[in-house]
Amino acid sequence: MKRQSIFSALLFTLVLMGGFVAGRVHAAQPHMNAALNHLRGAHRELDMATADKGGHRAKAIGLVRDAIAEVEAGIEFGRR
């Protein structure tokens, strides 16, 4: 009886720990975070580029800002 109680407690603890680790892995989102870092790097590079590009640089900056906002929203959604 005592052995079964110890085994049950151990199994319960392992299940709880497994759920915690799985939740942390799911919340980490390494690919989304990598994409966010790349987009922020692209934004910095576009900011440093010369301004006269027929409006394409300015449009690209706006699109990258939008992409950053979408990736951040996706990361936040994934944390729920």
Image (spheres, helix red, strand yellow):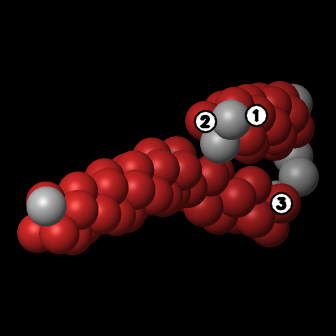
Question: Crowding at label 3, few (<14), some or many (≥20) Cα neighbours within 10 Å?
Answer: few
The quadrant the N terminus occupies is bottom left
Label 3: which residue?
Answer: 47
Q: Is residue 50 above or below residue 61?
A: below
Number of numbered markers: 3
Q: Can the viewer see residue 54?
A: no
Point out the tag, 3 or 1, that comes first from the N-terminus: 3
23 and 76: which is toward the camera: 23
Q: Residues within 10 Å of mark 1 (few under 14, many from 20)?
A: few
On the image, the x and y values in percent for residue 68 come to 74, 42
Furthest-front residue in view?
Answer: 1
Query: Residue 66: where, in percent of width, then height?
Result: 80, 31
Are the two marked residues, 3 and 2, in contact with CB atoms closer than 8 angstroms?
A: no
- Please state which amino acid type lies under the numbered disc 3: Asp
Please identify the quarter of the rendering in which residue 20 is found.
bottom left
Q: Is residue 60 left or right of residue 16?
A: right
Q: Amino acid at mark 1?
A: Ala
Image quadrant occupied by the C terminus: top right
Say which label, 3 or 2, has the lower sequence index: 3
- Residue 78 marker: 2
For residue 73, the mark is: 1
Q: Is residue 37 visible?
A: yes
Q: Residues within 10 Å of mark 2 (few under 14, many from 20)?
A: few
3 or 1: mark nearer the eye: 1
Between residues 58 and 39, which one lies in front from this camera angle?
39
Kindly check if marks 2 and 1 are in contact, taking CB atoms under 8 A apart as contact.
no
